[in-house]
């Protein structure tokens, strides 16, 4: 094909779904056949599963990002750093905060953002953990709390300053809790042991359901609770949050819990607001797609990851909003786009979970893989190995592996940026 006959493929979102789709396109197309534009708010891919380690000084912020331009430049493709304003499927255009782009095929992979469920004060007074800035902010606020508490004379004021709350007992909240406890009790306390003690510190994890880590087997849910409690974390199960205030959290039983910093990890919602009057979506705001991950409204629009909800006839398949799903849907969509443009038969997407993994801090992990359930150091090393190989470049894999190795011998980073 010559330049004029190239098919224009636009990818909205540079997360796992979008970037894995992009990487797979060139397994099916020659670079002279397609012209790809990837639209993302930043010029980097963010490895979100490790944000909790950045938030607790285990990894630097540079360790969890990779340049998108680096990958696109190899094929002379373009990254469009902007926000998506609107999509016009009839005219096949995407309007961004910078310009309007035309497309022949559109891949929607915009991911998800924090869901506050309308809880008063939650968005205003809590910190989320979805972006790099969130992780940096959490680390900074924890360090700042210790600096403030170290000069306070009143015991109650010290305790209030060092009261930390995590809302949400899913994988993000549990992993953050395990790392935060180590960051505080094994690193920061040593720097302030002349003026502070462990008794001044409280870490509380609140979960609305009766158990942590709903997707995990019962034995691992129990293990998670045990590990967190051993790390001096107070876990409140079957407890909701009625309101978040600047210095406290109001529980569902009207109890007021002091909290100098509240971290909200209780849920996510798909970033599909711009499609509400354009595409059919389920009640949760996810785009309805068929078994080929193709929009039910427009055949040249595909959706992957957190924004996609597979609906076949009257049967709906709610796939988890996880990186594991996005990583597998991205390449599948690339293959189906090739078939779509060639007029050949597309392949239905089939998903079966390969298991669940979680880290609860150094040498503490949970694993449910291929029917095997185990915990402790083996699960922790497996968790690290699996996530390490999800990074895109070999350079980043080596860098993170080096950082993790160094962290076994040195204390966590207490730099406040």
Image: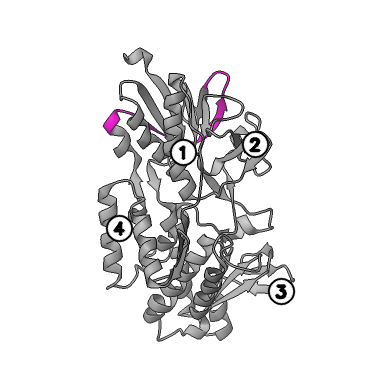
Q: Cα distance, mark 3 to mark 2? A: 38 Å
Q: Residue at x 41, y 58 (%)?
A: 50
Residue 255 marker: 3
- Quadrant location, the N terminus: top left
Mark 4 or mark 3, which is nearer the start of the sequence? Answer: 3
- Quadrant location, the C terminus: bottom left
Mark 3 vs mark 2: give the one in front: 2
Residue 286 placement (x, y as % from top left)? 61, 40
Label 1 close to label 4 by CB (< 8 Å): no
Mark 4 or mark 1, which is nearer the start of the sequence? Answer: 1
Taking the view exactly as shown, the residue that stands out farthest to the front is: 371
Q: Cα distance, mark 3 to mark 1? A: 41 Å
Residue 17 placement (x, y as % from top left)? 45, 41
Give the crowd class for mark 2: few <14, some 14-19, many >=20 residues within 10 Å: many
- The image shows residue 57, relative to residue 282, as above or below, that is below
Q: Cα distance, mark 3 to mark 4? A: 42 Å
Residue 414 placement (x, y as % from top left)? 36, 69
Q: Is residue 125 magenta?
A: no
Label 2 close to label 1 by CB (< 8 Å): no
* Start-end of magenta stretch: 74-92
Q: Is residue 360 visible?
A: no
Residue 13 marker: 1
Mark 3 vs mark 4: give the one in front: 4
Q: How is the image coloured?
A: one colour
């Amino acid at each position: 094909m010559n330049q004029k006959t190239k098919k224009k493929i636009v990818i909205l979102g540079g997360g796992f779904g979008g970037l894995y789709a992009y990487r797979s396109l060139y397994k099916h197309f020659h670079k002279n056949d397609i012209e790809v534009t990837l639209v993302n708010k930043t010029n980097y891919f963010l490895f979100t599963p490790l944000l909790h380690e950045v938030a607790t000084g285990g990894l630097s912020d540079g360790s969890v990002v990779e340049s998108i331009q680096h990958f696109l430049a190899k094929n002379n493709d373009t990254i469009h750093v902007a926000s998506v304003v609107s999509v016009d499927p009839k005219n096949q255009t995407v309007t961004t905060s910078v310009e309007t782009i035309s497309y022949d095929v559109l891949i929607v992979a915009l991911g998800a953002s924090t869901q506050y469920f309308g809880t008063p004060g939650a968005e205003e007074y809590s910190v989320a953990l979805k972006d790099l800035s969130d992780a940096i902010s959490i680390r900074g606020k924890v360090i700042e709390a210790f600096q403030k508490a170290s000069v306070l004379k009143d015991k109650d004021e010290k305790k209030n300053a060092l009261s930390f709350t995590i809302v949400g007992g899913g994988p993000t909240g549990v992993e953050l809790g395990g790392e935060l406890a180590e960051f505080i009790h094994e690193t920061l306390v040593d720097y302030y042991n002349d003026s502070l003690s462990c008794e001044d510190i409280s870490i509380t994890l609140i979960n609305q359901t009766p158990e942590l880590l709903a997707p995990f087997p019962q034995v691992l849910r129990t293990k998670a609770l045990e590990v967190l409690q051993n790390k001096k974390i107070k876990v409140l199960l079957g407890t909701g949050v009625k309101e978040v205030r600047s210095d406290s959290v109001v529980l569902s039983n009207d109890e007021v819990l002091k909290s100098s910093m509240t971290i909200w990890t209780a849920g996510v919602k798909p970033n599909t607001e711009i499609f509400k009057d354009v595409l059919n979506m389920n009640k949760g705001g996810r785009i309805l797609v068929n078994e080929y991950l193709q929009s039910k409204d427009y055949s040249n629009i595909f959706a992957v990851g957190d924004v996609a909800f597979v609906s076949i006839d009257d049967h709906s398949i709610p796939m988890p909003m996880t990186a594991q799903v996005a990583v597998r849907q991205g390449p599948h969509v690339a293959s189906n786009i090739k078939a779509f443009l060639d007029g050949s038969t597309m392949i239905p997407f089939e998903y079966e979970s390969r298991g669940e993994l979680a880290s609860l801090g150094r040498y503490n992990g949970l694993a449910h893989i291929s029917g095997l359930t185990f915990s402790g150091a083996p699960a922790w090393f497996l968790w690290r190995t699996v996530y390490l190989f999800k990074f895109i470049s070999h350079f980043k894999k080596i860098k993170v592996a080096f950082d993790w190795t160094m962290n076994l011998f040195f204390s966590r980073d207490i730099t406040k940026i």
